[in-house]
Image (cartoon, rainbow, N blue to C red):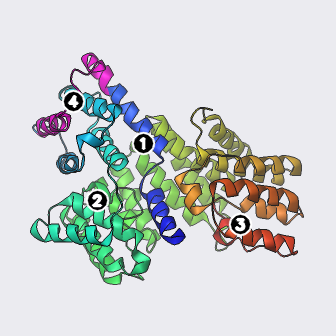
Amino acid sequence: MWRGDTKRRRSAARRNPSTAVRCRLLARVLVAIALAVPCVGAAQDEGPGVIDQVRSSLDGLLLRDDLTAQQVAVTEEMQAWLDALREQDLNPLHMRLLDAIARGLPHSAGELSVREIVDTVAALVDLVVDDELDEEQAAELEAKLVVDPDDIFSRTRLVRHYDTTRLDGSARAHGKHVVWLVENAPYAYELRRTGDNRIFGLSAGEAYSAGFEAWRRHVEREPDNPVFLARYARFVELKQPSLAVDLLERAHRVDARNPWLAEELGTLYLRAAMRADERAYDAQAAAKALRQFDRAYDLADDDIMRHSVLGQRAWAAFAAKRYDLAKQHAQAMLDANPPQDPDGDLLHKGNTILGRIALIEGDVALAKMHLLESGKVPTSPSLGSFGPSMTLASELLAMGQREVVLDYFDLCAIFWDAEELNTWRVAIDTGQTPDFGHHAWLR
């Protein structure tokens, strides 16, 4: 039971931002539409039919002649996603949001991007539709695809389902559906920045090769398509990181004002800067990453994007040994958390960085304070699934600071229910050094 729950939590953590972030996205789009169309402020009819109204508005959107191929493809896909929504499952806020979208779409040019529209629909579906499938439901969706192979929503649900059961023998089925999307629907929403569409060569080698060739052909046909270049890079980044960097650099040259591309490129640069032991960094390469994160932050047009980049900037500055700048960025991570809606990830990572800098500067007491503060955080999909960083804890433990590390374990147990904490506690109590594994360098 625990193992299955963990797989589901890890899948959710990889696929979706936190519920708070998604709600902020929905609220932001609702406000944007209300500003663009003042009359939207008071919905006229939030009863049955609002989903059909959105579908009709999306039909009208597709009549515009200024849409890119990607916008057309994803808008059409979102029309199918609407079929998954049932109005009896929507609360008044959901209904109001859909009503606002339906009436605001005709007036959205220049005020609300198509990307935000489809991201909002997708986020709403993710919030409302139960994504868990049992084997019988998965078999029903497989049967639907035999009749209608172009049913992208059903295929998306299967990709997500098989991603959670890869260790149980579903890697080939997962790879098959991802490859179909790459070959036939390269603009599909599921192929954006997620973890559950990634194919691992060891468990699905044939699928990886097929997906690789499909993306290569897409890029060969459209060498300046930044979407294809970026998605190809994400597909190969774990197995062929040098190729991924080259592809993202090409995408960035074509779409230089895209903050997401700058952030992704910075992430690859920072990963390349890590040395073999995962703890030391190539300062020069880290500085290269920092420049991309700074660019992403400057280009970001909303707080969601800026919060996403804050932690990356701080770690890159730390790795580049620019400790004053790292301290400034880490403090910004803490300051970006309103008391009524704190972000556990930002608080945890920000305090970890500040604590490590305190140790470098010789202030052990301050480092201990930041270690405890990094544990006094609300849970998040990432913290609850992958667990906390033990980097600062391991550094303090090496200095003989046992008690504060044990206190830190107690705090982490509130948001991370894992046996590792007990194992590490026993090791410390018996005078041994715990094996923190990847948690010892988890950023």
As shown in the figure, which amino acid type bears the numbered disc 2?
Phe
Find disc 3 in the rendering and name its residue.
421
Mark 1 vs mark 4, foreground winner is 4
Residue 285 locus on image (x, y percent): 59, 60
Q: Secondary structure at mark 2?
A: helix
Q: Residue at x 28, y 59 (%)?
A: 228
Mark 1 or mark 4: name the one nearer the start of the chain. 1
Quadrant in the rendering for residue 334: top right
Residue 231 locus on image (x, y percent): 34, 60
The magenta stretch spans which residues? 33-62
Mark number, residue 22: 1
Decide whether the magenta segment is chiefly helix, strand or loop.
helix
Using the numbered discs, state the Cα–Cα distance from disc 3 to disc 1 in whole angstroms: 30 Å
Q: Secondary structure at mark 3?
A: helix
As shown in the figure, which amino acid type bears the numbered disc 4?
Gly
Q: Residue at x 55, y 61 (%)?
A: 385
User: Circle 4: is it few (<14), some (14-19), or many (20+) Cα within 10 Å?
Assistant: few
Residue 306 locus on image (x, y percent): 51, 40
Find disc 4 in the rendering and name its residue.
47
Q: Nearer the viewer, residue 324 or 30?
A: 30
Q: Is 170 placed above or below 333 here?
A: below
Mark 2 or mark 4: name the one nearer the start of the chain. 4
Mark 3 vs mark 1, foreground winner is 3
Is 246 on the left or on the right of 348, as rendered? left
Mark 2 or mark 3: name the one nearer the start of the chain. 2
Mark number, residue 228: 2
Q: Secondary structure at mark 1?
A: helix
Q: Is residue 111 visible?
A: yes
Q: Residue at x 65, y 42 (%)?
A: 329
Is 204 a magenta residue? Answer: no
Q: Secondary structure at mark 4?
A: loop
Mark 1 or mark 2: name the one nearer the start of the chain. 1
